[in-house]
Amino acid sequence: MRSWVVNLCCLVASVAWAQKTVTVVASYTYHVPENVTVEQAKTTALERAKVQAIADEFGTLIGQSNSTLVTNENGKSDTHFSSIGRSDVNGEWIETIGEPQYAINYEQGMLIVNVKVKGRIRKLSGPKIDLAVNILRNGTELKYESDDFRNGDDMYLHFQSPVSGRLLVYLVDYTARQVYCLLPYSQQADMAQPIEQGREYLFFSAKSVAAEERQVVDEYTLTTDKKMEQNEMVVIFSSGELAKANTSASEGLLPRAMSIDHFNKWLAEMRIKDKNIQIINKSLTIKN
């Protein structure tokens, strides 16, 4: 059994060649609630900008609109947001071009984050696969699902697909500009983790596999030396062939890694070439 202790800094990102991508410039202004940090607000604003750009270009799958209502009564501001999410829009964000531009201001004591981002999007060619992706904290049952971790907590990943395919899992560290490969495991010879249809998988837990397989399992404990870090897991599934990106050995106990620029370029190329690829992004927070 291999065990990793991962020190994460602030993190966090189809159709055939014949189908064209569309280049868009998206912007969004987020009126931030009091309990949300600046970094969390920047992540939310960027995500909503991307989703709104796709909805404006290709429409939504459920006909729900996106609106923000800010009220001010007796000097107290209140924000109401009706959101459309990634799964509700009729398209995908393929890649970001350049760096998002942020403007951070305060109005009447309320934090306001504006973001402008350029990228390429495309229209969905068919229905998405109903994937079950759950990040678990300090436990291997679904009741332990959480995106809120404490320093020293163990992390597991539950996954299930109604169709067979291949799976890759990465963790992006925007502060270090590195992307870590969590799956397939570092000792696996597979280019991607094989997935059987309907089978439930529990990754990063040696106890969940047969004794002869335990030596290849990497286990993860999340640590931080900051008050709070916000990170993102990128789960990549394809019902066709899938091959991991080229990575290099990291220092200490950190998993193999690549630069974030390399990862973004590789992922964009994979998404354009393979209509079967489906990506799920999972944010998680680590607190000290």
Image (cartoon, rainbow, N blue to C red):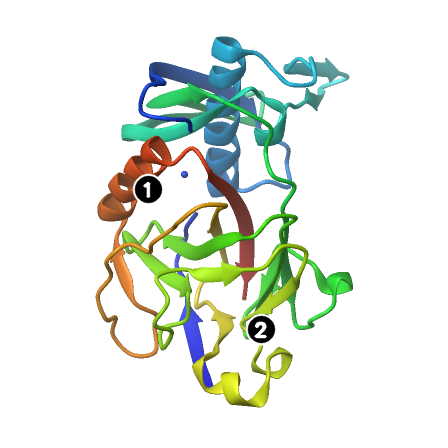
The spot of residue 287 in percent (x, y) is: 55, 61
The residue carrying pointer 1 sits among few (fewer than 14), some (14 to 19) or many (20 or more) residues within 10 Å by Cα, namely some
Asked which secondary structure carries label 2, the reply is: strand
State the residue at coordinates (38%, 30%): 94
Q: Which residue is mark 2?
A: 154
Identify the mark at residue 116; answer none if there is no mark: none
Say which residue label 1 marks.
Answer: 267
Would residue 237 be found to the left or right of residue 144 on screen? left
Above or below, 199 against 11 in this view is below
Q: Nearer the viewer, residue 89 or 29?
A: 89
Instruction: Give the residue drawn at x 37%, y 67%.
Output: 190
Q: Is residue 167 left or right of residue 148?
A: left
Mark 1 vs 2, N-terminal side = 2
**Vertical relation: 188 (above or below) 236:** below
Q: Given the image, on which type of amino acid does mark 1 rest?
A: Leu
Asked whether the viewer can see residue 106, the reply is no
Task: Provide residue 35's location: percent of width, then percent of height.
Answer: 64, 41
Assess whether mark 2 and mark 1 are in contact (beta carbons under 8 angstroms).
no
Q: Position of residue 141 (x, y in %)?
A: 74, 68
Where residue 56 appears, x then y in whole percent?
51, 10
**At 48% across and 70% down in the image, what residue appears?**
223
Q: Secondary structure at mark 1?
A: helix
